[in-house]
Image (tube, grey):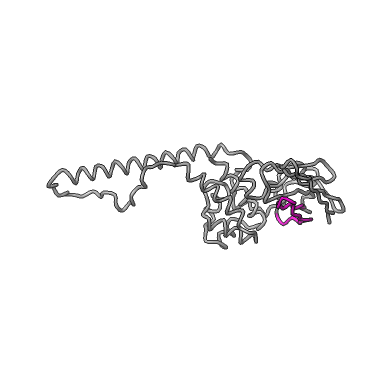
């Protein structure tokens, strides 16, 4: 049940990396606090729909695919506590202690009050049990994607690799996704979009795709090994999916190829020169 929210959090972290904003800066530019952004970006809690829209606005990114991913994550998140139990009554309606409760004329009011208390206790138990389940499940998410974010270590830190040391590694986790160059973009015959990205600071390139179908494959090749990524499920079709990095330098040629899952689909490739 946490996979969809993990994908959403990863997509939000990519957008945040692109803005190069600290948590404090995000708080200043949006209606949400610094601690709220920390929870949303770490996947500790599901962000409101408006928070996703705000981050897309700050990153100058169309919000359609991120909102579609949010819908999937929201559905999975709300399903954790699937229970027919009614929602608990507001705290103001809970019985308050009295010094001298008036004697009941009949036993009926006491029976109704007892039934209300039983319903509230059951609903409270369901909520606490659901929260406990979430608490114990969240630490099981894959590392290092769930390493906690902190405002003292914003995404504006220097990239964590360069050239050969970036080979086969994640561009977002290694801080290479801040302000990369788009070498070229093309739309495939199936309607998918493929981009070749290049980070001068990291000396590496990668490809990303969106609007693809389950089973589609994207490859990127520079001077070293070919890196690829396959669209695995519906969530992948609703957001950006990117390959690992491969080293590249100024003047080098980068090649991206798209392989559709359809048996009669043709392989499509495009090349671009770095720098």
Give the camera-side residue of 204 and 185: 185
Query: Which residues lie in the magenta part?
Result: 178-197
Snapshot quadrant of residue 4 = top right
The residue shown at (57%, 58%) is 53
Does the magenta segment cover residue 195?
A: yes
Assign the magenta stretch its main secondary structure. Answer: strand
Question: Extreme right residue here?
Answer: 251
Asked whether residue 244 appears in the rendered view, the answer is no
Give the camera-side residue of 69 and 263: 263
Q: Is residue 267 left or right of residue 93?
A: right
Q: Is residue 60 left or right of residue 245?
A: left
**Residue 65, position as x, y percentages in the image:** 62, 53
Q: Is residue 183 placed above or below 85 in the rendered structure?
A: below
**Residue 226, position as x, y percentages in the image:** 80, 41
Report the number of discs. Answer: 0
Does the magenta segment cover residue 14?
A: no
Give the camera-side residue of 274 and 156: 274
Snapshot quadrant of residue 27 = bottom right
Q: Is residue 145 left or right of residue 89?
A: right
The residue shown at (58%, 39%) is 141
**Residue 62, position as x, y percentages in the image:** 63, 59
The residue shown at (31%, 53%) is 92
């Amino acid at each position: 049940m946490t996979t969809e929210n993990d994908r959403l959090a990863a997509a939000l972290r990519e957008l945040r990396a692109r803005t190069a904003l600290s948590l404090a800066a995000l708080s200043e530019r949006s209606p949400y606090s610094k601690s709220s952004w920390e929870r949303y970006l770490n996947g500790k809690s599901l962000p409101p729909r408006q928070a996703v829209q705000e981050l897309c606005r700050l990153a100058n990114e169309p919000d359609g695919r991120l909102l579609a991913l949010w819908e999937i994550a929201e559905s999975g998140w709300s399903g954790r506590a699937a229970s027919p139990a009614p929602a608990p009554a507001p705290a103001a309606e809970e019985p308050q202690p009295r010094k001298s409760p008036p004697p009941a004329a009949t036993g009926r009011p006491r029976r109704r009050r007892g039934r209300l208390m039983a319903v509230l206790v059951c609903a409270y138990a369901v909520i606490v049990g659901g929260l406990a389940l979430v608490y114990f499940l969240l630490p099981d998410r894959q590392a290092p994607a769930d390493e906690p974010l902190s405002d003292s270590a914003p995404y504006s830190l220097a990239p964590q690799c360069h050239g050969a040391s970036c080979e086969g590694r994640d561009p977002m986790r290694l801080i290479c996704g801040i302000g990369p160059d788009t070498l070229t973009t093309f739309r495939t015959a199936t309607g998918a979009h493929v981009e070749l990205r290049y980070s001068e600071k990291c000396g590496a390139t990668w490809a990303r795709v969106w609007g693809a179908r389950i089973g589609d494959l994207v490859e990127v090749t520079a001077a070293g090994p070919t890196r690829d990524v396959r669209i695995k499920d519906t969530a992948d079709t609703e957001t950006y999916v990117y390959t690992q990095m491969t080293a590249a330098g100024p003047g080098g040629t980068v090649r991206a190829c798209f392989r559709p899952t359809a048996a009669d689909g043709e392989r499509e490739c495009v090349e671009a020169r770095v720098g």
